Image (spheres, rainbow, N blue to C red):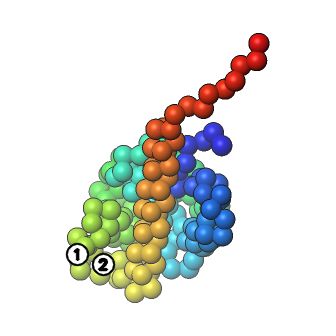
């Protein structure tokens, strides 16, 4: 496998783990097909976390799970540049979720009641719970992919035998 792992391609890198890896992959696919939060908005959360991690590979990764629900290039760029919360192209619901994602990335314990209430106002209690679960999965996958990249980069190069 030559591509560096990202949250998007992590399943292929973990497949050797067997059933546990497949369960993790099913959870990932389910996030993008649930009814509580739009897939596009979850992708913007993934990009927010990639930006906050300073992970260029993750920011560039194309999420194949989105189907026809990918964010527009303008919305994607605003998230990646950190200007989405001030951008009129983002609705109050979008901004509530993206702000919540930033709090979550810094420290889940730092999430204010106001930030949680803003998400609930737009997506209900079930939407808030789904967001918390999705952010945990997204952040976990980004961190796991980064660890795999670091391990791969630190591994000594394999020697090849030369016949001559």
Is 92 situated left or right of 13 in this image?
left
Q: Residue at x 57, y 77 (%)?
A: 34
Task: Tell me which corner region of the image, top left, top right, bottom left or bottom right, holds residue 1.
Answer: top right
Give SS at disc 1: loop
Q: Residue at x 37, y 69 (%)?
A: 97
Q: On the rendered image, what quadrant is the C terminus found in?
A: top right
Comparing 38 with 134, the one in front is 134
When the figure is inspected, residue 18 is found, relative to residue 82, above or below; the finding is below
Q: Which residue is mark 1?
A: 112
Comparing 17 with 5, the one in front is 17
When the figure is inspected, residue 1 is found, relative to residue 159, above or below; the finding is below
Residue 76 position, x and y percent, is: 46, 51
Residue 81 position, x and y percent, is: 36, 46
- Inspect this view and state whether residue 47 appears: no
Measured Cα–Cα span from mark 1 to mark 2: 6 Å
Q: Are marks 1 and 2 in contact (CB under 8 Å)?
A: yes
Task: Tell me which corner region of the image, top left, top right, bottom left or bottom right, holds residue 114.
Answer: bottom left
Residue 162 position, x and y percent, is: 71, 19
Residue sitting at the far right:
164
* Residue 101 tag number: none
Is 80 situated left or right of 159 in this image?
left
* Residue 116 tag number: 2
Comparing 38 with 108, the one in front is 108
Q: Residue at x 46, y 71 (%)?
A: 134
């Amino acid at each position: 496998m030559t591509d560096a792992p990202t949250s998007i391609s992590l399943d292929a890198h973990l497949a050797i783990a067997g059933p546990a890896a497949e369960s993790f992959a099913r959870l990932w696919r389910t996030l993008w097909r649930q009814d509580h939060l739009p897939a596009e908005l979850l992708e913007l959360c993934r990009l927010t976390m990639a930006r906050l991690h300073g992970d260029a590979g993750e920011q560039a990764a194309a999420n194949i799970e989105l189907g026809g629900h990918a964010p527009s290039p303008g919305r994607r760029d605003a998230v990646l540049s950190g200007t989405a919360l001030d951008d009129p192209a983002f609705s109050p619901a979008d901004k509530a979720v993206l702000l919540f994602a930033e709090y979550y990335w810094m420290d889940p314990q730092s999430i204010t009641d106001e930030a949680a209430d803003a998400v609930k106002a737009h997506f209900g209690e079930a939407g808030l719970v789904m967001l918390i679960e999705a952010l945990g999965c997204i952040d976990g996958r980004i961190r796991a992919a980064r660890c795999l990249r670091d391990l791969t980069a630190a591994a000594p190069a394999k020697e090849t035998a030369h016949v001559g």
